[in-house]
């Protein structure tokens, strides 16, 4: 199992290109099932979750080839509506294969999904929404069986603005007769990207980015070449890393209007941030002011996927910060590992009280989930001495060779295989 070895104390300086977004590429790859022609995804991210999704698609009959940084998917021969267990159980995003499989095959059989152990990750909103569209669903022996022979358009209200459930229902409705509305839907930029991808194939979806999405059914979708949006969570992770280590970094492709909440918090912590139409420039002294309060919310609130990273930054701030995690009940895994490095954190239910300490010390720590693992890297960039991070496969799920990016900026980090 690969490890990272990091020596702390080196500032980050230079420029990075931000890749396309994991959480945009995954629903777009799933959505390609709805097209019975060729789909080309330009500059598709190559994280392990993406690779697992392509394996699932190949198991359904897709022929996928890499064309430089692009992926070309021949979806003309999808002959199977049951996904392979091996990969389905590794990733959370396999759950939103139900929608596109129902659109294409009118049936679907998918094992329960995997994903980060950051909470119970229920799927009730996905299934409730599909049942509103007339899908017959049986859950048995760890599988979800869907019969969409009598599907119809419908009006759906989501009890929570679930990203995955919004995407699943959107894709299930694309080729239904009539108009489907999804109320109280998620508003993430990746939802808007999925809408744009579907419309580029000839679909009729509107309202993404607001709390009501409308899908007007069409008969067929045609081939497309599509470039997904850049990864706002990777951009945010590297901004927080720069704040932690100190330095001067420019992130090409980063979209400031996708990171308004984070930029506000980092400016409060003392960073200088200049934003442009297609890049973000951050300068940080390494002196960090406590931001006193961070509360995760659905977009456009402070993103849960940047909670662990900000918590880490606050461990060396000049005061106390209260962090409330409202989306996932188990997203403070990292605190035990940060405590080994000298952090002062107290967790009470969904709240973490972080008291800034003068410095962290290098230690042997273990990544336990994707964003928590990335946050341990951030801690190690500043900690005194050596830090070894085990279970780096968690980090590889959402960052492609993070060690190369950080080394390019001057960090002393290497992967030990
Ligand atoms: C997506 O997960 C992202 N994953 C997550 O990113 C992200 O943290 C999350 O959205 C929130 O922004 C992908 O896009 C692949 P949700 P998803 O459904 O769709 C509850 C990362 O690090 N809920 O929006 O699974 C749920 O428990 C990952 O890149 C139900 O109750 O998240 C949570 O409290 C981690 N029932 C809230 O909704 C359901 O049926 C938001 O979850 C579904 C969700």
Image: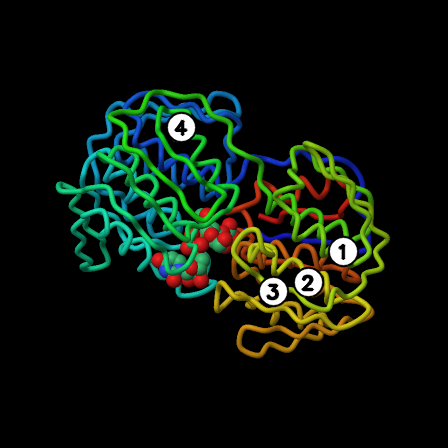
Is tag 1's residue or tag 3's residue first in the polypeptide sequence?
A: 1
Q: CA distance from mark 4 to mark 1?
A: 41 Å
Do tag 2 and tag 1 residues touch (Cβ < 8 Å)?
Answer: yes
**Residue 179 appears in the picture as rendered:** yes
Determine the quadrant in which ligand 1 lies: bottom left
- Where residue 248 appears, as percent x and y from the top left, is 82, 43
Q: CA distance from mark 2 to mark 4?
A: 40 Å
Do tag 4 and tag 1 residues touch (Cβ < 8 Å)?
Answer: no
- Judging by the rendered image, the residue that carries numbered circle 1 is 244
- Where residue 75 appears, as percent x and y from the top left, is 30, 26
- Where residue 383 appears, as percent x and y from the top left, is 76, 61
Q: CA distance from mark 2 to mark 3?
A: 15 Å
- Judging by the rendered image, the residue that carries numbered circle 4 is 199
Residue at the location (48% across, 69% down)? Answer: 329
Secondary-structure class at tag 4: helix
- Judging by the rendered image, the residue that carries numbered circle 2 is 312
Q: CA distance from mark 2 to mark 1?
A: 9 Å
Residue 288 sits in which quadrant? bottom right
């Amino acid at each position: 199992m690969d490890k990272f070895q990091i020596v702390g104390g080196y500032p980050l300086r230079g420029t990075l290109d931000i890749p396309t977004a994991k959480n945009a590429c995954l629903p777009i790859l799933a959505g390609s099932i709805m097209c019975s022609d060729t789909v080309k995804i330009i500059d598709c991210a190559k994280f392990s979750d993406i690779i697992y999704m392509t394996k699932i698609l190949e198991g359904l009959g897709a022929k996928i080839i890499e064309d430089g940084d692009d992926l070309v998917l021949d979806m003309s021969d999808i002959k199977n509506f049951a996904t392979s267990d091996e990969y389905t159980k590794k990733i959370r995003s396999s759950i939103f294969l139900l929608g596109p499989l129902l659109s294409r095959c009118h049936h679907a059989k998918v094992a329960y999904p995997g994903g980060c152990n950051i909470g119970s990750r229920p799927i009730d909103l996905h299934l409730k929404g599909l049942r509103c569209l007339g899908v017959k669903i049986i859950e048995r022996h760890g599988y979800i069986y869907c019969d969409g022979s009598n599907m119809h358009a419908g009006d759906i209200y989501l009890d929570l603005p679930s990203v995955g459930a919004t995407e699943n229902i959107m894709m299930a409705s694309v080729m239904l007769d009539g108009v489907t509305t999804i109320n109280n839907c998620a508003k993430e930029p990746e939802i808007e990207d999925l809408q744009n991808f579907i419309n580029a194939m000839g679909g009729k979806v509107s309202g993404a980015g607001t709390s009501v999405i409308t899908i007007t059914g069409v008969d067929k979708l045609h081939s497309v070449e599509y470039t997904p949006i850049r990864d706002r969570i990777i951009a945010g992770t590297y901004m927080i890393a720069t704040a932690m280590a100190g330095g001067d970094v420019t992130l090409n492709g980063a979209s400031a209007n996708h990171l308004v909440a984070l930029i506000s918090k980092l400016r409060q912590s003392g960073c200088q941030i200049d934003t442009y139409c297609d890049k973000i420039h951050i300068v940080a002294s390494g002196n960090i002011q406590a931001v006193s309060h961070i509360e995760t919310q659905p977009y456009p609130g402070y993103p849960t996927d940047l909670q662990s990273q900000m918590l880490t930054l606050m461990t060396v701030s000049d005061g106390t910060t209260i962090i409330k995690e409202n989306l996932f009940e188990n997203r403070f895994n990292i605190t035990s590992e940060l405590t080994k490095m000298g952090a002062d954190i107290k967790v009470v239910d969904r709240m973490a009280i972080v008291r800034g300490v003068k410095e962290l010390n290098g230690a042997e720590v273990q990544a336990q989930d994707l964003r928590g693992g990335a946050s341990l890297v951030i801690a190690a960039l500043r900690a005194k001495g050596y830090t070894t991070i085990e279970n780096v496969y968690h980090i590889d799920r959402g960052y492609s060779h993070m060690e190369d990016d950080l080394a390019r900026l001057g960090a002393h980090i290497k992967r030990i295989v």
